[in-house]
């Protein structure tokens, strides 16, 4: 929320008066020159050192005193520093020395963002705040809160909902789902072909099973069971390998893009179990096709 046409104090009072607003944090964003003073990075003051904005800290801790700051992975790589180091920047011609105490998940500016309490800035850069970050109560509708604030201010405020970075990946999710479907169809087609060829190579075994008195349904069940064991082994091995690698691969991509490690999460046990059951069940259904045909076929038996 930006005060726009209202004094900052009036905007703050309106935000705190809304019943769905849980907390209000003053904020300011200013460009800061890095130590070599050859390029600028984004310096974001959010909250105060005593009441910091609740960033997602994945390494170290949140800033809790003046002069402490957290940074995105992109900034750490740019300055070639690590948590615990001190960094000297220049903000509006004023030197600013901060102690890096943590790393946060930072999707903006390729992670080249430094965040700290607004009280760490010089007064000329911090007063009045450029904006206020609002944290809503669980279950609150951001659209309704925005509408109430605009009505209360007579359209004098600028209120925007912060976009979840994951929502920007909607089109990529569609592509991934389509790719998974294509790969699944290719895998099932290969399984169908392999099963048909395998049954043809074991035609003599089918004759033996029928000679033993097995019905076509029992023959089909025997063939599906043999193939199903291989399917289960393959699905379990793939699921274990995927679950153990997915977090590291996502973190590796996050590190190279500046967002940083700490965003990768392995699927839940329930999700993994459902995916495994769907994979095994679908594969077994496909295997039933050649197994049923082989069980009904008339296999000649030659005496040896």
Image (cartoon, grey):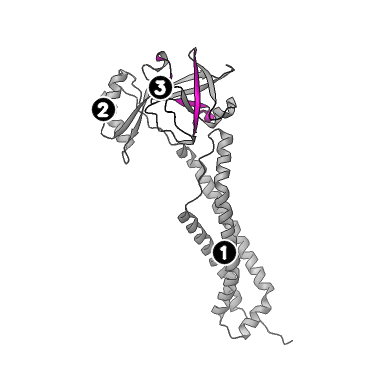
Q: In this view, does 299 lie above or below 127?
A: below
Q: Residue under label 2, please give it.
A: 151
Sooner in the amino-acid sequence: mark 3 or mark 2: 3
Return the x and y of residue 223 as percentages of the image width and height: 59, 73
The residue labelled by disc 1 is 232
Q: Give, as a single range, the part of the protein colored magenta.
A: 94-123
In this view, 24 is above or below 175 = above
Residue 155: in sight, yes or no?
A: no
Q: Residue 199: image x %, image y %?
A: 65, 72
Q: Does the magenta stretch include residue 264?
A: no
Q: Determine if the magenta segment contains residue 102.
A: yes
Residue depicted at 52% across the width and 59% down the height: 276
Q: Which of 51 and 2 is in front in this view?
A: 51
- What residue is pinned by disc 3? 118
Distance between the alpha carbons at the discs numbered 3 and 2: 29 Å
In the picture, which quadrant includes the N terminus? top left
Number of numbered labels in the structure image:
3
Q: Which residue lies furthest to the right in this view?
A: 304
Question: What number is the disc on residue 94?
Answer: none
Secondary element at image label 3: helix
């Amino acid at each position: 929320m930006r005060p726009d046409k209202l004094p900052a104090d009036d905007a703050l009072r309106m935000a705190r008066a809304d019943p769905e607003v849980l907390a209000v944090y003053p904020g300011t964003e200013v460009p800061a020159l890095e130590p070599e003073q050859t390029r600028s990075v984004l310096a974001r003051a959010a909250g105060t050192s005593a009441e910091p904005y609740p960033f997602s800290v994945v390494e170290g801790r949140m800033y809790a005193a003046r002069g402490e700051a957290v940074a995105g992975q992109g900034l750490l790589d740019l300055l070639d520093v690590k948590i615990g180091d001190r960094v000297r920047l220049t903000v509006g011609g004023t030197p600013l020395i901060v102690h890096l105490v943590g790393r946060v998940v930072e999707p903006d500016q390729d992670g080249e963002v430094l965040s700290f309490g607004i009280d760490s800035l010089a007064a000329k850069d911090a007063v009045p705040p450029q904006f206020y970050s609002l944290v809503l109560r669980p279950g609150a509708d951001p659209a309704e809160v925005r509408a109430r604030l605009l009505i209360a201010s007579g359209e004098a405020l600028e209120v925007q909902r912060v976009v979840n970075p994951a929502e920007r990946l909607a089109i990529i999710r569609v592509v991934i789902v389509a790719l998974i479907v294509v790969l699944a169809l290719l895998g099932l087609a290969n399984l169908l072909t392999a099963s048909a060829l395998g049954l043809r190579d074991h035609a003599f075994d089918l004759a033996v099973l029928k000679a033993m008195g097995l019905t076509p349904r029992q023959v089909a069940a025997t063939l599906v069971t043999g193939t199903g064991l291989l399917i289960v082994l393959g699905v379990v091995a793939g699921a274990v390998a995927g679950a153990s690698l997915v977090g590291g691969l996502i973190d590796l991509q996050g590190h190279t893009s500046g967002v940083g490690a700490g965003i990768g999460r392995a699927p839940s046990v329930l999700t993994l179990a459902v995916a495994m059951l769907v994979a095994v069940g679908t594969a077994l259904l496909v295997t039933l096709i050649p197994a049923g045909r082989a069980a009904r076929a008339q296999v000649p038996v030659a005496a040896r």
